[in-house]
Image (spheres, helix red, strand yellow):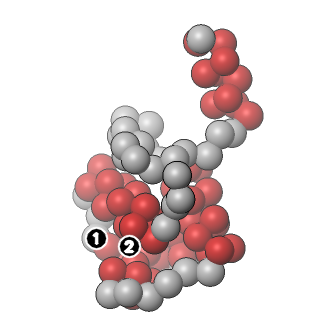
């Protein structure tokens, strides 16, 4: 699966819904820029490094009681990999 900015927006929307936040708050947390998500929504792009950093940020800060959005690959971290391997 090829990941793109639509996946970042899916994560942002699910994250803000789970925590009841505004777009600019999520944008500030993820990108240290309150206008970046709006820019992405209107067609702006991301560098690969900013995209990867955003995916990592969401992974590390995802609310425990919220489901990771379907259709968005989640990074495999050592602790999650070990837990999934044990559960199998």
Q: SS for tag 1?
A: loop
Of residues 58 and 32, the one drawn nearer to the viewer in this rendering: 58
Q: Please identify the residue farthest to the right as the structure is shown.
A: 78
Q: Is residue 46 above or below residue 58?
A: below
Q: According to the image, label 2 marks what residue?
A: 25
- Quarter-wise, where is residue 44 in the image? bottom left
Q: Residue at x 45, y 65 (%)?
A: 8
Q: Residue at x 49, y 67 (%)?
A: 4
Q: Which mark is residue 84?
A: none
Measured from the top left, where is residue 83 in percent x and y? 64, 21
Q: SS for tag 2?
A: helix
Of residues 83 and 26, the one drawn nearer to the viewer in this rendering: 83
> Quick check: can you spot residue 38?
no
Q: According to the image, label 1 marks what residue?
A: 22
Q: CA distance from mark 2 to mark 1?
A: 5 Å
Measured from the top left, where is residue 12 in percent x and y? 38, 63
């Amino acid at each position: 699966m090829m990941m793109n900015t639509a996946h970042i927006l899916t994560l942002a929307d699910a994250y803000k819904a789970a925590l009841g936040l505004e777009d600019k708050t999520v944008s500030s947390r993820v990108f240290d820029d309150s206008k970046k998500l709006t820019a992405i929504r209107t067609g702006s792009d991301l560098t690969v490094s900013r995209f990867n950093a955003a995916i990592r940020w969401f992974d590390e800060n995802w609310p425990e009681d919220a489901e990771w959005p379907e259709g968005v690959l989640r990074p495999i971290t050592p602790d999650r990999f070990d837990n999934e391997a044990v559960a199998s």
